Each structure stands twice: as C-alpha cells, then as structure tokens.
Amino acid sequence: MFVASAPFADGADAQARSLGMPGVARVFTPHPVQDRTDEEMRAYADLVVDEVLAALVGPR
C-alpha cells in the first residue's frame, strides 16, 4: 500500500501496473505537501488515517 498526494494518482496507478501490482491499495492526501507546517501535515494525516489503516489491516 502506498500514500501519495492527489495530483499523483494517475502516475501512481501507472507505476503500480508497471510493477505488476495493479490492485495495490493506495491512499491519496490533499496537495500540496511541500512547505506545509507540522500542523497542516497533521490535518492532512487526520483526513486519511482511517483509509490508511483499512488498507493495512482491514476496516476498523
């Protein structure tokens, strides 16, 4: 499973297919992530944490 920011969804899909893992779980965060404050990054993480956990261990 991997996490990337939203504008990279198409590239992530292509990379997963090229690596033979088209069904790999993927979670996309808001963009941009560069130059975000720690507080802003925590907010981004809060938005996707349940998706990340579900991808790793199944629904909670």
Image (cartoon, rainbow, N blue to C red):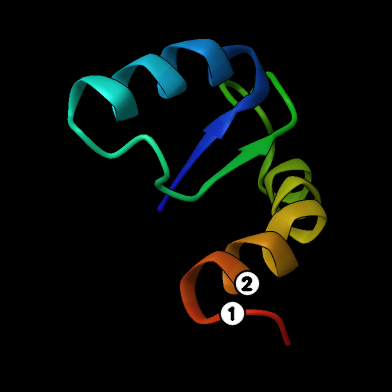
Residue 60 screen position, x and y as percent: 73, 87
Asked whether, in this view, residue 33 is left or right of residue 46, the answer is left
Residue 20 screen position, x and y as percent: 20, 33
User: How much space separates mark 1 and mark 2, taking CA atoms?
Assistant: 4 Å
Marks 1/2 in contact by CB < 8 Å: the verdict is yes
Asked whether, in this view, residue 10 is left or right of residue 48, the answer is left
Asked whether, in this view, residue 33 is left or right of residue 26, the answer is right
Asked whether, in this view, residue 4 is left or right of residue 54, the answer is left
Up the image or down, 27 lies above or below 47; here it is above
> Is label 1 in a helix, a strand or a loop?
loop
Residue at 37% across / 15% down in the picture? 14
> Which residue has dot 1 on it?
58
Identify residue type, mark 2. Ala
Identify residue type, mark 1. Gly
Residue at 62% across / 72% down in the picture? 54
Residue 57 screen position, x and y as percent: 51, 81
> Is label 2 in a helix, a strand or a loop?
helix
> Which residue has dot 2 on it?
54
Pointer 1 local density, CA inside 10 Å: few below 14, some 14–19, many at least 20: few
The number of numbered discs placed on residues in the rendered structure image is 2
Q: Which mark is residue 16?
A: none
Residue at 47% across / 72% down in the picture? 56
Can you name the residue that lies furthest to the left here? 19
Up the image or down, 17 lies above or below 56; here it is above
Depth check: 30 or 51 in front?
A: 51
Depth check: 28 or 40 in front?
A: 28
Residue at 54% across / 65% down in the picture? 55
Can you name the residue that lies furthest to the bottom here? 60
Q: Quadrant of residue 53?
A: bottom right
Up the image or down, 8 lies above or below 30; here it is above
Residue 19 screen position, x and y as percent: 18, 29
